[in-house]
Amino acid sequence: MINIEVLENYNKTRKASARNLVCHAPSVNLNFEQNGNVTACCYNRSFVLGRYPEKSITEIWNGDKIKELRKYISEGNLSGGCSACEEVINSGNFEGSKARYFDEYAEKQSSVWYKNLFFSNKKELTPKVLEFEISNSCNLECSMCNGYFSSAIRKNREKLPALKNPYDEKFVGQVSEFLPNLSDAKFLGGEPFLIDLYYKIWDKIIENNTNIRVHITTNGTILNTKVKNYLDKLNAGIVLSIETLNKERFETIRKNASYEIVLKNIEYFKDYAKKKKTYFALAVCPIQQNWMDIPELVEFCNRNEITIHFNIVWTPDTASLKFFDKNQIKEVIAFYKQQIFSFKGRTFSLNIARFNQLIDQLVFWEKEQLETGQENNIQELIGSGFGDLEILDINTCLVLRSLLNEYSNKELVFLKEKITEILINHKVKETNFLKLAKIIGYNNSLHFFNECMKYFTINNQYISQNFQEKVEIITNNYRSLSNSESMDLVIQLNNAGLFYSISYINKLSFEMLSELINKSKN
């Protein structure tokens, strides 16, 4: 839950009409993920409202799951997959919260669905915003990214086959039905200008409703004649992702990108937005590799009257500032607090507010480390029984805690590797497993084990006797799954890469896999 005092301060930064709910996303927005999952926004990946093409967009919008999430939100309950915004708001980083981006639609729509919330026979209004993340097609291999969002990373770094894409012409047709009443359409990636289906959706927008505010988040490397022609016909705002103005660090972080080309394209996008009277903004991921360059980016944006937005990076642990030790975080905070920005242009106030709230986020993480004593506890555990586990370092434990707190869908591959290594390869004993569970954030070791087993069915010979019964229940339950539930599990296992690793397949029941796959095809 959000701290009451923090919530009051948060609401002071919002317009009065939006304050009746912490977040209005479930009443106005649908987000389409790469694997067909549909959620209320791109921050909430665990509370799945439905899956395309198993359900149509209309069925999902009027379905029981979205009504359930709306009910949670109406009660101020953020346990429906909304922990990312909960943490960010509690830290005081209000501008970093995804929830506030839906406040502008509150007056237009939320009161209607709120009144009819418990009447299942009444359809809700149509969504005002659609967010598209329907493909991981991308030409870059950014250091803080993964194969779920980049086809290049999936192929070259993770050595996994391409993700199966469920979206098709029928999907474009279903989207078209919502365009007359749509206010905003957001296109993310992958890299949007490399995703063929986006051009078909843009064609429909051009045909049906050019008043739709189109938002495109690009890595800035693709700008050809085709892209320019489409942009001329659209009412598009551009968000360009960049981490630093240092050429060497830029091309290290954003592998395959040309620093010179991106800077040149920034000028084009900036002029385009001015001509179209939309906006051009920079989205920045403050990470371990670029924290020292953030003030220069802020000054650059102030000087060029560009707004800046800071993405909060939780994973991987080798990139997220959250996993700096307390001395490193203290150093970053001190460095940021001593900054003086000289150029005070049109965007100065907003950019400085966002920079200061980034500092608040870091202070929150520093305080969190000091209060929980995570670092010392994990070191003590390693020294008293986990000394032989090379992979069980401090960052691994902390990132597991973060991933299991609503972020597992986004990092299935990473989660699979770390948990299976701990549970299987090192044959963790019950007593040590209990200690590990408590440090990662679960007072009940079986609760932690359940969270692990949501995604992985493993051979019970590797688990201590006390967990045998639990494993058997989970491994036997697959027989009672429906065809659609079987398909869901197969897709999750597939996305986790389990079907492409012989070492992991050897630890699974071939009978179980075969039956699951056959059922999922029906």
Image (spheres, rainbow, N blue to C red):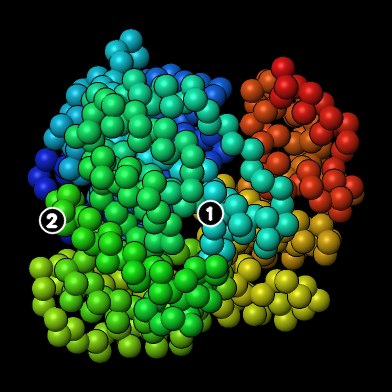
Say if 507 sits above or below 197 in the image. below
Picture quarter with the C terminus: top right
Q: Along the horizontal axis of the image, is 152 left or right of 263?
A: right
Provide the secondary structure element on which disc 1 rests.
loop
Q: Is residue 202 above or below residue 521?
A: below
Q: Which residue is mark 2?
A: 12
Q: Which residue is mark 1?
A: 138
Say whether residue 473 is visible.
yes
Q: Residue at x 39, y 61 (%)?
A: 220
The three-letter amino acid code for the residue at tag 2 is Lys
User: Are the residues flagged by discs 1 and 2 in contact, CB closer than 8 Å?
Assistant: no
Q: Is residue 10 left or right of residue 68?
A: left
The residue drawn where x is 39% and y is 88% is 331
- Residue 474, percent across and down? 75, 36
Q: Is residue 500 above or below residue 50?
A: below
Task: Please say whether residue 75 is visible from this viewpoint.
Answer: no
Instruction: For label 2, count other residues whose C-alpha is less than 10 Å away and answer few (under 14), some (14-19) or many (20+).
Output: few
- The front one of 7 and 38 is 38
